Image (tube, coloured by chain):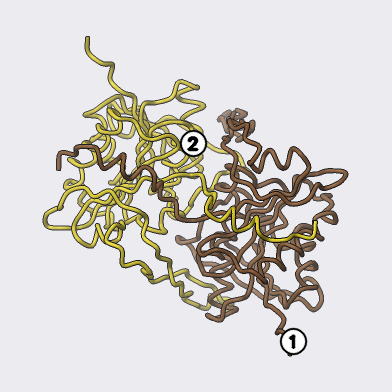
Chain colours: A yellow, B brown
Amino acid sequence: MTKAKPTILVVNDDGITAPGIKALIYAMNDIGRVVVVAPDSPQSGMGHAITIGKPLRFDKEEIYEGIEMYKCSGTPVDCVKLAVNLVFKGKKPDLCVSGINHGLNNSINVLYSGTMSAAVEGAIEGIPSIGFSLDDYTLQADFKPCIKYVKDIALQVLEHGLPPATLLNVNFPIAEKLMGIKICRQANAKWAEEFDERIDPHKRPYYWLTGVFQLNDQGEDTDVWALANGYVSVVPVQFDMTAHHAIPVLNTWKFND
Amino acid sequence: MTKAKPTILVVNDDGITAPGIKALIYAMNDIGRVVVVAPDSPQSGMGHAITIGKPLRFDKEEIYEGIEMYKCSGTPVDCVKLAVNLVFKGKKPDLCVSGINHGLNNSINVLYSGTMSAAVEGAIEGIPSIGFSLDDYTLQADFKPCIKYVKDIALQVLEHGLPPATLLNVNFPIAEKLMGIKICRQANAKWAEEFDERIDPHKRPYYWLTGVFQLNDQGEDTDVWALANGYVSVVPVQFDMTAHHAIPVLNTWKFND
Protein backbone atom coordinates (compact mmCIF):
# COMPACT_ATOMS: atom_id res chain seq x y z
CA MET A 1 0.00 0.00 0.00
CA THR A 2 1.43 3.38 -0.97
CA LYS A 3 0.58 6.59 0.85
CA ALA A 4 -1.59 9.09 -0.99
CA LYS A 5 0.31 12.12 -2.29
CA PRO A 6 0.09 14.98 0.21
CA THR A 7 -1.76 18.14 -0.75
CA ILE A 8 0.38 21.25 -0.33
CA LEU A 9 -0.84 24.85 -0.20
CA VAL A 10 1.79 27.29 -1.49
CA VAL A 11 1.45 30.97 -0.62
CA ASN A 12 3.76 34.00 -0.44
CA ASP A 13 3.86 37.76 0.04
CA ASP A 14 5.98 38.86 -2.92
CA GLY A 15 3.13 38.10 -5.32
CA ILE A 16 2.17 35.16 -7.51
CA THR A 17 4.75 35.93 -10.24
CA ALA A 18 7.78 36.25 -7.90
CA PRO A 19 10.75 33.94 -8.65
CA GLY A 20 10.73 32.78 -5.03
CA ILE A 21 7.26 31.25 -5.19
CA LYS A 22 8.08 29.66 -8.55
CA ALA A 23 11.04 27.88 -6.93
CA LEU A 24 8.82 26.75 -4.05
CA ILE A 25 6.04 25.56 -6.37
CA TYR A 26 8.38 23.29 -8.32
CA ALA A 27 10.10 21.98 -5.16
CA MET A 28 6.71 21.06 -3.67
CA ASN A 29 5.47 19.63 -6.98
CA ASP A 30 8.09 16.89 -6.55
CA ILE A 31 6.54 15.97 -3.20
CA GLY A 32 2.79 16.30 -3.57
CA ARG A 33 -0.23 17.89 -5.20
CA VAL A 34 0.34 21.65 -5.23
CA VAL A 35 -2.33 24.33 -4.90
CA VAL A 36 -1.11 27.92 -5.12
CA VAL A 37 -3.06 30.85 -3.65
CA ALA A 38 -1.02 34.02 -3.72
CA PRO A 39 -1.44 37.80 -3.88
CA ASP A 40 -1.80 39.39 -7.32
CA SER A 41 0.68 42.13 -6.28
CA PRO A 42 3.58 42.44 -3.82
CA GLN A 43 2.46 42.42 -0.17
CA SER A 44 5.77 42.65 1.69
CA GLY A 45 5.59 44.03 5.20
CA MET A 46 1.86 43.35 5.47
CA GLY A 47 2.28 41.39 8.70
CA HIS A 48 -0.92 39.70 9.83
CA ALA A 49 -3.16 42.19 7.99
CA ILE A 50 -6.54 41.03 6.73
CA THR A 51 -8.91 42.83 4.36
CA ILE A 52 -12.11 43.81 6.14
CA GLY A 53 -13.12 47.21 4.77
CA LYS A 54 -13.34 46.22 1.12
CA PRO A 55 -14.13 43.09 -0.90
CA LEU A 56 -11.59 40.71 -2.41
CA ARG A 57 -11.00 39.49 -5.94
CA PHE A 58 -10.11 35.81 -6.24
CA ASP A 59 -9.47 34.21 -9.63
CA LYS A 60 -8.07 30.96 -10.98
CA GLU A 61 -5.14 31.51 -13.35
CA GLU A 62 -2.77 28.75 -14.50
CA ILE A 63 0.46 30.75 -14.78
CA TYR A 64 2.61 27.61 -14.75
CA GLU A 65 1.33 24.71 -16.84
CA GLY A 66 -0.32 21.93 -14.89
CA ILE A 67 -0.27 23.80 -11.54
CA GLU A 68 -3.56 24.71 -9.82
CA MET A 69 -3.16 28.43 -9.13
CA TYR A 70 -5.36 31.23 -7.77
CA LYS A 71 -4.51 34.90 -7.38
CA CYS A 72 -6.10 37.16 -4.83
CA SER A 73 -6.29 40.94 -4.43
CA GLY A 74 -5.75 40.75 -0.67
CA THR A 75 -3.01 40.10 1.85
CA PRO A 76 -1.03 36.87 2.42
CA VAL A 77 -3.31 36.01 5.38
CA ASP A 78 -6.38 36.58 3.17
CA CYS A 79 -4.86 34.08 0.71
CA VAL A 80 -4.73 31.35 3.35
CA LYS A 81 -8.29 32.07 4.49
CA LEU A 82 -9.54 32.00 0.88
CA ALA A 83 -7.64 28.77 0.19
CA VAL A 84 -9.10 27.01 3.21
CA ASN A 85 -12.64 28.17 2.53
CA LEU A 86 -13.05 28.43 -1.25
CA VAL A 87 -10.52 25.90 -2.57
CA PHE A 88 -10.19 23.20 0.09
CA LYS A 89 -13.70 23.83 1.46
CA GLY A 90 -12.94 22.50 4.94
CA LYS A 91 -10.82 19.51 3.80
CA LYS A 92 -7.47 20.89 4.96
CA PRO A 93 -4.26 20.46 2.97
CA ASP A 94 -1.49 18.36 4.55
CA LEU A 95 1.03 21.20 4.49
CA CYS A 96 1.15 24.96 4.01
CA VAL A 97 4.41 26.50 2.78
CA SER A 98 5.01 30.21 2.34
CA GLY A 99 7.75 31.91 0.32
CA ILE A 100 10.42 31.53 -0.68
CA ASN A 101 10.63 35.15 0.42
CA HIS A 102 12.98 37.57 -1.29
CA GLY A 103 14.70 38.80 1.88
CA LEU A 104 15.26 37.46 5.41
CA ASN A 105 12.46 37.04 7.93
CA ASN A 106 14.64 36.21 10.89
CA SER A 107 14.45 37.70 14.39
CA ILE A 108 11.87 40.51 14.90
CA ASN A 109 11.04 40.45 11.17
CA VAL A 110 8.69 37.55 11.90
CA LEU A 111 6.19 40.19 13.09
CA TYR A 112 6.29 42.40 9.98
CA SER A 113 6.53 39.62 7.43
CA GLY A 114 3.58 38.73 5.22
CA THR A 115 5.36 35.48 4.37
CA MET A 116 5.49 34.42 8.01
CA SER A 117 1.99 35.69 8.79
CA ALA A 118 0.61 33.48 6.02
CA ALA A 119 2.36 30.51 7.64
CA VAL A 120 1.05 31.59 11.07
CA GLU A 121 -2.47 31.67 9.62
CA GLY A 122 -1.95 28.18 8.21
CA ALA A 123 -0.97 26.99 11.69
CA ILE A 124 -4.00 28.70 13.25
CA GLU A 125 -6.08 26.69 10.76
CA GLY A 126 -4.42 23.54 12.12
CA ILE A 127 -2.29 22.95 8.99
CA PRO A 128 1.42 22.07 9.51
CA SER A 129 3.04 25.24 8.18
CA ILE A 130 6.48 26.53 7.22
CA GLY A 131 7.74 29.91 6.05
CA PHE A 132 10.90 30.03 3.90
CA SER A 133 13.04 33.12 3.25
CA LEU A 134 16.36 33.83 1.53
CA ASP A 135 18.77 36.65 2.31
CA ASP A 136 18.43 38.25 -1.14
CA TYR A 137 15.89 40.98 -1.91
CA THR A 138 16.50 41.03 -5.65
CA LEU A 139 14.42 39.52 -8.42
CA GLN A 140 17.66 37.82 -9.52
CA ALA A 141 17.94 35.86 -6.25
CA ASP A 142 19.26 32.31 -6.75
CA PHE A 143 17.00 29.91 -4.87
CA LYS A 144 18.69 26.73 -6.16
CA PRO A 145 20.93 26.18 -3.10
CA CYS A 146 17.80 26.27 -0.88
CA ILE A 147 15.80 23.61 -2.67
CA LYS A 148 17.40 20.52 -1.12
CA TYR A 149 16.74 21.93 2.37
CA VAL A 150 13.24 23.14 1.52
CA LYS A 151 12.29 19.64 0.41
CA ASP A 152 13.98 17.93 3.37
CA ILE A 153 12.28 20.20 5.93
CA ALA A 154 8.88 19.83 4.21
CA LEU A 155 9.24 16.02 4.18
CA GLN A 156 10.26 15.96 7.86
CA VAL A 157 7.21 18.05 8.79
CA LEU A 158 4.96 15.77 6.74
CA GLU A 159 6.50 12.74 8.49
CA HIS A 160 6.67 13.97 12.10
CA GLY A 161 4.01 16.67 12.21
CA LEU A 162 4.69 19.68 14.42
CA PRO A 163 3.98 20.26 18.13
CA PRO A 164 0.46 21.70 18.57
CA ALA A 165 0.02 25.37 17.68
CA THR A 166 3.55 25.79 16.32
CA LEU A 167 5.02 26.37 12.86
CA LEU A 168 8.52 26.79 11.42
CA ASN A 169 10.38 29.91 10.32
CA VAL A 170 13.20 28.84 7.98
CA ASN A 171 15.80 31.34 6.72
CA PHE A 172 18.65 30.83 4.27
CA PRO A 173 21.88 32.81 4.23
CA ILE A 174 23.82 33.62 1.08
CA ALA A 175 26.88 31.41 1.47
CA GLU A 176 29.38 29.59 -0.74
CA LYS A 177 28.54 26.43 1.15
CA LEU A 178 25.56 26.04 3.51
CA MET A 179 26.70 24.56 6.86
CA GLY A 180 23.50 22.58 7.51
CA ILE A 181 20.37 23.18 9.58
CA LYS A 182 20.38 24.78 13.04
CA ILE A 183 17.31 24.88 15.33
CA CYS A 184 17.28 28.37 16.88
CA ARG A 185 15.36 30.94 18.85
CA GLN A 186 14.31 34.36 17.53
CA ALA A 187 17.16 36.83 18.18
CA ASN A 188 16.39 39.93 20.24
CA ALA A 189 16.67 42.79 17.77
CA LYS A 190 14.75 45.75 16.40
CA TRP A 191 14.80 48.16 13.49
CA ALA A 192 16.17 51.61 14.23
CA GLU A 193 14.14 53.63 11.78
CA GLU A 194 15.03 56.70 9.93
CA PHE A 195 12.53 58.52 7.76
CA ASP A 196 13.84 59.97 4.55
CA GLU A 197 11.99 63.30 4.16
CA ARG A 198 11.41 64.57 0.64
CA ILE A 199 9.37 67.39 -0.85
CA ASP A 200 6.78 66.65 -3.53
CA PRO A 201 6.21 68.87 -6.65
CA HIS A 202 3.43 70.64 -4.70
CA LYS A 203 5.92 71.61 -1.96
CA ARG A 204 4.46 69.19 0.61
CA PRO A 205 6.71 66.81 2.59
CA TYR A 206 6.52 63.03 2.35
CA TYR A 207 8.49 60.31 4.10
CA TRP A 208 10.09 57.01 3.11
CA LEU A 209 10.56 54.43 5.84
CA THR A 210 14.16 53.23 6.03
CA GLY A 211 15.89 51.42 8.84
CA VAL A 212 18.98 49.83 10.29
CA PHE A 213 18.77 46.38 11.89
CA GLN A 214 19.87 46.69 15.51
CA LEU A 215 20.95 43.42 17.14
CA ASN A 216 20.74 43.34 20.94
CA ASP A 217 21.60 39.68 21.39
CA GLN A 218 24.95 37.92 21.25
CA GLY A 219 23.47 34.45 21.85
CA GLU A 220 24.86 31.62 19.72
CA ASP A 221 21.45 29.91 19.82
CA THR A 222 19.74 32.62 17.73
CA ASP A 223 18.69 32.72 14.09
CA VAL A 224 20.88 35.78 13.52
CA TRP A 225 23.97 33.90 14.75
CA ALA A 226 23.13 30.81 12.68
CA LEU A 227 22.69 32.81 9.47
CA ALA A 228 25.88 34.82 10.07
CA ASN A 229 27.72 31.52 10.39
CA GLY A 230 26.37 29.98 7.19
CA TYR A 231 23.63 27.79 8.70
CA VAL A 232 20.02 27.43 7.60
CA SER A 233 18.09 28.73 10.63
CA VAL A 234 14.90 26.97 11.75
CA VAL A 235 12.90 28.71 14.50
CA PRO A 236 9.76 27.08 15.89
CA VAL A 237 7.13 29.83 16.16
CA GLN A 238 3.95 30.05 18.25
CA PHE A 239 0.95 32.35 18.02
CA ASP A 240 0.04 32.36 21.70
CA MET A 241 1.44 35.80 22.46
CA THR A 242 0.72 35.59 26.20
CA ALA A 243 3.75 36.52 28.30
CA HIS A 244 2.92 33.71 30.74
CA HIS A 245 5.88 34.58 32.97
CA ALA A 246 4.44 38.07 33.53
CA ILE A 247 1.08 36.88 34.92
CA PRO A 248 2.33 36.38 38.53
CA VAL A 249 4.03 39.80 38.40
CA LEU A 250 0.82 41.57 37.37
CA ASN A 251 -1.13 39.70 40.03
CA THR A 252 0.90 41.51 42.71
CA TRP A 253 -0.37 44.90 41.52
CA LYS A 254 -3.17 46.52 43.56
CA PHE A 255 -5.81 47.84 41.19
CA ASN A 256 -8.46 50.29 42.43
CA ASP A 257 -11.34 48.17 41.16
CA MET B 1 9.99 67.70 44.85
CA THR B 2 7.21 66.80 42.42
CA LYS B 3 7.66 64.31 39.62
CA ALA B 4 7.66 65.67 36.07
CA LYS B 5 4.45 64.99 34.15
CA PRO B 6 4.84 61.83 32.07
CA THR B 7 4.77 62.10 28.29
CA ILE B 8 2.18 59.79 26.74
CA LEU B 9 1.96 58.74 23.10
CA VAL B 10 -1.62 57.99 22.04
CA VAL B 11 -2.22 55.95 18.90
CA ASN B 12 -5.05 53.82 17.46
CA ASP B 13 -6.21 51.93 14.38
CA ASP B 14 -9.72 53.30 13.90
CA GLY B 15 -8.32 56.63 12.75
CA ILE B 16 -7.61 59.98 14.38
CA THR B 17 -11.25 61.11 14.46
CA ALA B 18 -12.66 57.92 16.09
CA PRO B 19 -14.60 58.42 19.36
CA GLY B 20 -12.42 55.76 21.02
CA ILE B 21 -9.19 57.71 20.62
CA LYS B 22 -10.92 60.90 21.75
CA ALA B 23 -11.90 59.16 25.00
CA LEU B 24 -8.33 57.91 25.44
CA ILE B 25 -6.79 61.32 24.67
CA TYR B 26 -8.83 63.03 27.39
CA ALA B 27 -8.22 60.24 29.92
CA MET B 28 -4.46 60.52 29.34
CA ASN B 29 -4.58 64.33 29.35
CA ASP B 30 -5.53 64.09 33.05
CA ILE B 31 -2.33 62.12 33.71
CA GLY B 32 0.40 63.60 31.52
CA ARG B 33 1.48 65.46 28.41
CA VAL B 34 -0.31 63.86 25.48
CA VAL B 35 1.07 63.47 21.95
CA VAL B 36 -1.28 61.87 19.44
CA VAL B 37 -0.02 60.15 16.26
CA ALA B 38 -2.82 58.29 14.52
CA PRO B 39 -3.86 57.12 11.06
CA ASP B 40 -5.80 59.58 8.88
CA SER B 41 -8.23 56.78 7.94
CA PRO B 42 -9.47 53.53 9.53
CA GLN B 43 -6.79 50.81 9.68
CA SER B 44 -8.64 47.99 11.42
CA GLY B 45 -7.27 44.50 10.81
CA MET B 46 -3.91 45.84 9.63
CA GLY B 47 -2.00 43.68 12.11
CA HIS B 48 1.69 44.49 12.21
CA ALA B 49 1.74 45.87 8.66
CA ILE B 50 4.24 48.60 7.78
CA THR B 51 4.38 50.77 4.67
CA ILE B 52 7.46 49.99 2.62
CA GLY B 53 6.42 50.21 -1.04
CA LYS B 54 5.18 53.79 -0.97
CA PRO B 55 5.93 56.99 0.97
CA LEU B 56 3.98 58.30 3.94
CA ARG B 57 2.24 61.59 4.62
CA PHE B 58 2.65 62.95 8.12
CA ASP B 59 1.05 66.23 9.18
CA LYS B 60 0.39 68.13 12.40
CA GLU B 61 -3.28 68.93 12.90
CA GLU B 62 -4.79 70.13 16.18
CA ILE B 63 -8.21 68.48 15.98
CA TYR B 64 -8.82 68.90 19.72
CA GLU B 65 -7.79 72.25 21.18
CA GLY B 66 -4.56 72.22 23.12
CA ILE B 67 -3.63 68.64 22.18
CA GLU B 68 -0.47 67.96 20.12
CA MET B 69 -1.75 65.79 17.26
CA TYR B 70 -0.30 64.32 14.07
CA LYS B 71 -2.08 62.30 11.41
CA CYS B 72 -0.35 59.80 9.17
CA SER B 73 -1.33 58.09 5.93
CA GLY B 74 0.13 54.75 7.05
CA THR B 75 -0.63 51.89 9.40
CA PRO B 76 -0.81 51.95 13.21
CA VAL B 77 2.74 50.54 13.39
CA ASP B 78 3.94 53.29 11.02
CA CYS B 79 2.41 55.83 13.43
CA VAL B 80 4.53 54.56 16.32
CA LYS B 81 7.69 54.56 14.19
CA LEU B 82 6.96 58.10 12.97
CA ALA B 83 6.23 59.28 16.53
CA VAL B 84 9.48 57.87 17.89
CA ASN B 85 11.59 59.23 15.06
CA LEU B 86 9.99 62.51 13.95
CA VAL B 87 8.21 63.72 17.09
CA PHE B 88 10.17 62.38 20.04
CA LYS B 89 13.43 62.19 18.07
CA GLY B 90 14.95 59.46 20.20
CA LYS B 91 13.77 60.83 23.57
CA LYS B 92 11.17 58.14 24.23
CA PRO B 93 7.77 58.88 25.79
CA ASP B 94 7.04 57.38 29.22
CA LEU B 95 4.01 55.46 28.00
CA CYS B 96 2.37 54.39 24.74
CA VAL B 97 -1.38 53.72 24.78
CA SER B 98 -3.37 52.46 21.81
CA GLY B 99 -7.14 52.59 21.30
CA ILE B 100 -9.64 52.65 22.74
CA ASN B 101 -10.52 50.25 19.95
CA HIS B 102 -14.08 49.95 18.70
CA GLY B 103 -14.37 46.17 19.06
CA LEU B 104 -12.64 43.46 21.14
CA ASN B 105 -9.02 42.45 20.61
CA ASN B 106 -9.05 39.48 22.94
CA SER B 107 -7.71 35.99 22.19
CA ILE B 108 -6.39 35.37 18.65
CA ASN B 109 -7.50 38.87 17.62
CA VAL B 110 -4.26 40.18 19.09
CA LEU B 111 -2.59 39.03 15.84
CA TYR B 112 -4.96 40.81 13.42
CA SER B 113 -5.41 43.98 15.44
CA GLY B 114 -3.81 47.23 14.37
CA THR B 115 -4.50 48.59 17.85
CA MET B 116 -2.49 45.83 19.50
CA SER B 117 0.26 45.89 16.86
CA ALA B 118 0.80 49.59 17.56
CA ALA B 119 1.21 48.73 21.25
CA VAL B 120 3.56 45.85 20.35
CA GLU B 121 5.64 48.28 18.29
CA GLY B 122 5.75 50.65 21.27
CA ALA B 123 7.07 47.79 23.40
CA ILE B 124 9.66 46.86 20.77
CA GLU B 125 10.83 50.48 21.02
CA GLY B 126 11.25 49.95 24.76
CA ILE B 127 8.24 52.10 25.72
CA PRO B 128 5.84 50.70 28.36
CA SER B 129 2.77 50.07 26.19
CA ILE B 130 -0.90 49.19 26.57
CA GLY B 131 -3.65 48.43 24.07
CA PHE B 132 -7.29 49.14 25.10
CA SER B 133 -10.39 47.77 23.38
CA LEU B 134 -14.13 47.81 24.05
CA ASP B 135 -16.66 45.21 22.94
CA ASP B 136 -18.63 47.66 20.77
CA TYR B 137 -17.91 48.18 17.07
CA THR B 138 -20.25 51.13 16.63
CA LEU B 139 -19.38 54.80 16.40
CA GLN B 140 -21.94 55.27 19.21
CA ALA B 141 -19.88 53.11 21.62
CA ASP B 142 -19.95 54.42 25.21
CA PHE B 143 -16.37 54.55 26.52
CA LYS B 144 -17.27 56.27 29.81
CA PRO B 145 -17.37 53.08 31.94
CA CYS B 146 -13.82 52.24 30.76
CA ILE B 147 -12.15 55.50 31.75
CA LYS B 148 -11.62 54.79 35.45
CA TYR B 149 -9.88 51.49 34.57
CA VAL B 150 -7.91 52.99 31.69
CA LYS B 151 -6.46 55.62 34.03
CA ASP B 152 -5.79 53.14 36.83
CA ILE B 153 -3.98 50.69 34.55
CA ALA B 154 -1.96 53.48 32.91
CA LEU B 155 -0.94 54.84 36.33
CA GLN B 156 0.05 51.37 37.56
CA VAL B 157 2.22 50.84 34.47
CA LEU B 158 3.84 54.25 34.97
CA GLU B 159 4.48 53.38 38.61
CA HIS B 160 5.70 49.75 38.31
CA GLY B 161 6.94 49.56 34.73
CA LEU B 162 6.40 46.28 32.89
CA PRO B 163 8.56 43.15 32.75
CA PRO B 164 11.11 43.43 29.90
CA ALA B 165 9.73 42.93 26.37
CA THR B 166 6.12 42.71 27.47
CA LEU B 167 3.06 44.94 27.04
CA LEU B 168 -0.60 44.78 28.11
CA ASN B 169 -3.71 43.88 26.14
CA VAL B 170 -6.74 45.30 27.98
CA ASN B 171 -10.30 44.50 26.87
CA PHE B 172 -13.60 45.80 28.24
CA PRO B 173 -16.90 43.95 28.09
CA ILE B 174 -20.26 45.65 27.75
CA ALA B 175 -21.75 45.10 31.19
CA GLU B 176 -24.18 46.83 33.53
CA LYS B 177 -21.50 46.69 36.21
CA LEU B 178 -17.84 45.86 35.55
CA MET B 179 -16.62 43.18 37.98
CA GLY B 180 -13.05 44.49 38.22
CA ILE B 181 -9.73 43.59 36.60
CA LYS B 182 -8.63 40.02 35.86
CA ILE B 183 -5.10 39.10 34.72
CA CYS B 184 -5.53 36.44 32.02
CA ARG B 185 -3.93 34.44 29.25
CA GLN B 186 -4.92 34.63 25.58
CA ALA B 187 -7.75 32.14 24.97
CA ASN B 188 -7.21 29.47 22.33
CA ALA B 189 -9.64 30.36 19.55
CA LYS B 190 -9.79 31.07 15.84
CA TRP B 191 -12.09 32.64 13.27
CA ALA B 192 -14.04 30.20 11.12
CA GLU B 193 -14.30 32.23 7.95
CA GLU B 194 -16.99 32.34 5.42
CA PHE B 195 -16.67 34.37 2.27
CA ASP B 196 -19.79 36.12 1.06
CA GLU B 197 -19.66 35.81 -2.75
CA ARG B 198 -21.34 38.55 -4.78
CA ILE B 199 -21.41 39.46 -8.46
CA ASP B 200 -20.39 42.94 -9.58
CA PRO B 201 -22.20 44.95 -12.30
CA HIS B 202 -19.65 43.59 -14.81
CA LYS B 203 -20.64 39.97 -13.94
CA ARG B 204 -17.39 39.23 -12.11
CA PRO B 205 -17.42 37.66 -8.63
CA TYR B 206 -16.03 39.38 -5.53
CA TYR B 207 -15.82 38.25 -1.92
CA TRP B 208 -16.43 39.78 1.49
CA LEU B 209 -14.59 38.27 4.44
CA THR B 210 -16.97 37.30 7.24
CA GLY B 211 -16.37 34.96 10.12
CA VAL B 212 -17.58 33.26 13.27
CA PHE B 213 -15.42 33.29 16.42
CA GLN B 214 -14.66 29.69 17.35
CA LEU B 215 -13.59 29.19 20.97
CA ASN B 216 -11.56 26.04 21.64
CA ASP B 217 -10.75 26.74 25.25
CA GLN B 218 -12.91 26.35 28.36
CA GLY B 219 -10.22 27.68 30.73
CA GLU B 220 -11.37 30.11 33.42
CA ASP B 221 -7.98 31.87 33.25
CA THR B 222 -8.57 33.23 29.72
CA ASP B 223 -9.53 36.67 28.46
CA VAL B 224 -12.64 35.22 26.79
CA TRP B 225 -13.86 33.81 30.12
CA ALA B 226 -13.11 37.05 31.98
CA LEU B 227 -15.01 39.18 29.46
CA ALA B 228 -17.98 36.79 29.38
CA ASN B 229 -18.15 37.14 33.16
CA GLY B 230 -18.08 40.92 33.23
CA TYR B 231 -14.39 41.43 34.06
CA VAL B 232 -11.90 43.78 32.43
CA SER B 233 -9.33 41.36 30.94
CA VAL B 234 -5.62 42.19 31.11
CA VAL B 235 -3.28 39.89 29.16
CA PRO B 236 0.49 40.41 29.30
CA VAL B 237 1.75 40.05 25.72
CA GLN B 238 5.24 39.28 24.39
CA PHE B 239 6.73 39.64 20.93
CA ASP B 240 9.25 36.81 21.15
CA MET B 241 7.29 34.36 19.02
CA THR B 242 9.75 31.49 19.55
CA ALA B 243 8.01 28.29 20.63
CA HIS B 244 10.84 27.56 23.08
CA HIS B 245 9.25 24.27 24.18
CA ALA B 246 9.44 22.96 20.60
CA ILE B 247 13.22 23.40 20.25
CA PRO B 248 14.16 20.08 21.94
CA VAL B 249 11.53 18.27 19.83
CA LEU B 250 12.99 19.61 16.58
CA ASN B 251 16.50 18.73 17.72
CA THR B 252 15.52 15.05 17.65
CA TRP B 253 14.80 15.19 13.91
CA LYS B 254 17.46 13.80 11.56
CA PHE B 255 17.96 16.25 8.71
CA ASN B 256 19.81 15.18 5.55
CA ASP B 257 22.26 18.06 5.75
Residue A213 occupies quadrant? bottom left
Position of B119 with respect to A255 (left or right) is left
Residue lying farthest left?
A177
Residue at image coords 34%, 29%:
A8
Q: Quadrant of the C terminus of chain B?
A: top left
Q: Quadrant of the N terminus of chain B?
A: bottom right
> Residue B151's x, y, as percent?
77, 64
Residue at image coords 39%, 35%:
A163
Q: Which residue is mark 2?
A: A124
- Foreground mark, 2 or 1, reads 1
Residue at image coords 43%, 66%:
A190
Residue at image coords 46%, 36%:
A80
Position of A157 with respect to B4 (left or right) is left
Q: Is residue A161 above or below residue A239?
A: above
Q: Secondary structure at mark 2?
A: helix
Q: Nearer the viewer, residue A241 or A124?
A: A241
